Amino acid sequence: DQQVKQNSPSLSVQEGRISILNCDYTNSMFDYFLWYKKYPAEGPTFLISISSIKDKNEDGRFTVFLNKSAKHLSLHIVPSQPGDSAVYFCAASASLSTGPRAQKLVFGQGTRLTINP
Amino acid sequence: DSGVTQTPKHLITATGQRVTLRCSPRSGDLSVYWYQQSLDQGLQFLIQYYNGEERAKGNILERFSAQQFPDLHSELNLSSLELGDSALYFCASSQTSVTEQFFGPGTRLTVL
C-alpha cells in the first residue's frame, strides 16, 4: 500500500527556470510533510517541511505547497541551479500510538531532477 | 554533514551470516530511526528508539533487531542474512520537539 506517491520518476528543467516536484498521499492522519534531497552514495538531506495546518512554507529558493483537500503537496525550486540535480523524496510523518514521541516517516519513491545548463 | 555517523560504510558478507550496523545520532538527539532502501525502492521505516526504549516498529523482519544504548548510539543487528537483505541501511535522528529527521550517510550491505 503506497501511502505516499511521487508519480514522476524523473524531471528535466532548464537552469534558471522553475522546478515543480509533486507528491500525493492517501492517509489523512499524516500531520507533517517533508522534502529531502539525495545525492548518490549519501544520505537524504532535509530541505523543507510543512505542518498540516499550513498551506505554504518558504525557505529561500524552496517553497512547499500543501493542498489538504486534494491530499497533494508540491515543491517549487526557483530559480533552478545545476547543483539542484539530485533525487528528491517526499515524506509524510505519522505520530503513532505506540508511545510518546513515537513517529515514523513514510517516503515516496523519489523523483530524479536534472537541471540542464 | 548532518552530524549523524554510521559505520561501516560498506559491508560484504555471505548468506546465513550475522552483521551489526552502528549509528551515532546528532549531539542531543534522543530519537534514532532505522530505514532500509532496497534497489529501486523508497526508504522503508524499520524501527524507532527514543532514549533507549523502542517506540515504533515498521516492516522489520523478525531476523532483524535493534537497540539503543545509554550513550544513545544504536545498533541494528541483521541475522540469517539472505540475498534480498542487500540494501542501503540508513540511520536518522531527531530532537524531541521537532519532526525533522536527519540522516546519516548509510551502510551499504551486500549479501553474496
Image (cartoon, rainbow, N blue to C red):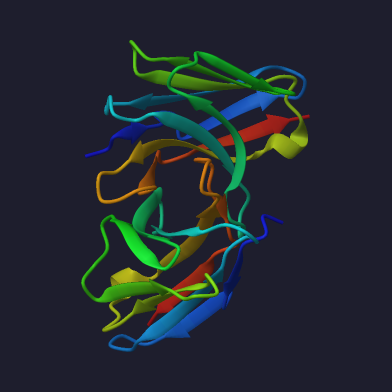
Q: Position of residue B3 (x, y in %)?
A: 67, 60
The quarter of the displayed image where residue A69 is located? top left
Residue B75 versus residue A71: which sits nearer the camera?
A: B75
Q: Position of residue B69 (x, y in %)?
A: 47, 76
Q: Quick check: B68 above or below A88? A: below
Q: Position of residue B8 (x, y in %)?
A: 57, 78
Question: Can the viewer see residue B85?
Answer: yes
Q: Quick check: A92 above or below B21? A: above
Q: Quick check: A48 above or below A53? A: below
What is the quadrant of the C terminus of chain A in the image? top right
The quarter of the displayed image where residue B13 is located? bottom left
What is the quadrant of the N terminus of chain A in the image? top left
Residue A61 versus residue B94: which sits nearer the camera?
A: B94
Q: Position of residue B66 (x, y in %)?
A: 36, 72
Q: Which residue is pictured at 62% across the width and 57% down the height?
A: A42
Q: Quick check: A59 above or below A88? A: above
The quarter of the displayed image where residue A72 is located? top left
Q: How many marks do you count on the picture?
A: 0
Q: Which residue is pictured at 54% across the width and 42% down the height?
A: B100
Q: Is residue A23 left or right of residue A69?
A: right
Q: Which residue is pictured at 29% across the width and 43% down the height?
A: A96
Residue B36 versus residue A39: which sits nearer the camera?
A: B36
Q: Which residue is pictured at 57% across the width and 76% down the height?
A: B7
Question: Can the viewer see residue B41?
Answer: no
Residue A55 versus residue B13: which sits nearer the camera?
A: A55
